[in-house]
Amino acid sequence: MNAVQRLYQYRKSISTTTFKARGFRVKRCEQCRVALTNCICALKPTTTSNVGFVLLMYDTEVLKPSNTGRLIADIIPDTYAFLWARTEVDNDLISLLKDPQWQPFVVFPSQYANDTQQVFQDTLPTLNNKKPLFIMLDGSWREAKKMFRKSPYLASFPMFSFNPDKVTTIQNNDENIISRYQIRKAVVNNQLASAEVAARVLAISGEEYNAQLLDLWFDVFNYRYQQSVCQRNSANAQAVAALEDFIGT
């Protein structure tokens, strides 16, 4: 059980009402949150990584079966997940951000940086005996902007940003960046799902294998999820075969 799955179980345990996301009548696997008939748990790959991710999740985001943050936690072993609250900060989160083995970076568009915040655009600095820890604000774009504005404890950390219009997609080198995430509709085409963002962060960090692995795992989720809830599945029908071919199974 990864960090997002544990957080999901906790959030569900404190709910006073049943959360009814779109497609709530579908009988889902409690681990991958895909329909039982299309469960992807047996396909989940394993890898190692020298980076970490922190997912700060908007309150109901962790309950949504369409959330892609869990895919990051599936692939990257050092992934941590916390519920975001405007008035409270989890002590475990603060301890993690202070851990000397990590150098935290807030992953967010550079135009939102404050006047004193250091910004690294499309590149990472040399880190002396530290590993990068990427903080991602997981929710809708409106929710992510709210989390960024109302989390002053993040302001002291450098920002890591990339221009989605200039970063080629990992699998097909298409310079016209359009999210492959059809489960939810973004406001504009270059707003990527959390797993798509994380894959590009991994690629820029020099972990090309893990970047492609996460991208392929995202495709598997995207296709199998739509198999269960959509009459028309516009995701990659060869997603499972592409993943298996990549990892050599």
Image: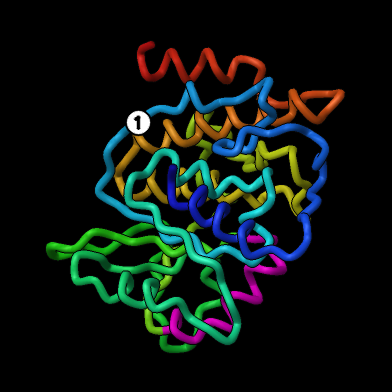
Q: Residues within 10 Å of mark 1 (few under 14, many from 20)?
A: few
Per the rendered image, the range of residues in magenta is 139-155
| Residue at screen point 51% across, 40% down | 168
**The furthest residue to the left:** 129
Q: Which residue is mark 1?
A: 46
From the viewer's side, name the closer residue of 28 and 54. 28
Q: Position of residue 95 (x, y in %)?
A: 31, 75
From the viewer's side, name the closer residue of 70 and 30. 30
Q: Position of residue 122 (x, y in %)?
A: 41, 57
Magenta segment: does it hold 147? yes
Magenta stretch, overall SS: helix
Q: From the viewer's perspective, is residue 158 above or below residue 115?
A: above
| Residue at screen point 46% across, 36% down | 214
From the viewer's side, name the closer residue of 174 and 112. 112
Q: Which of the 4 image quarters holds residue 14?
A: bottom right
Q: Secondary structure at mark 1?
A: loop
Magenta segment: does it hold 56? no
Q: Position of residue 55 (x, y in %)?
A: 49, 60
Quadrant location of the N terminus in the rendered image? top left
| Residue at screen point 78% across, 47% down | 185
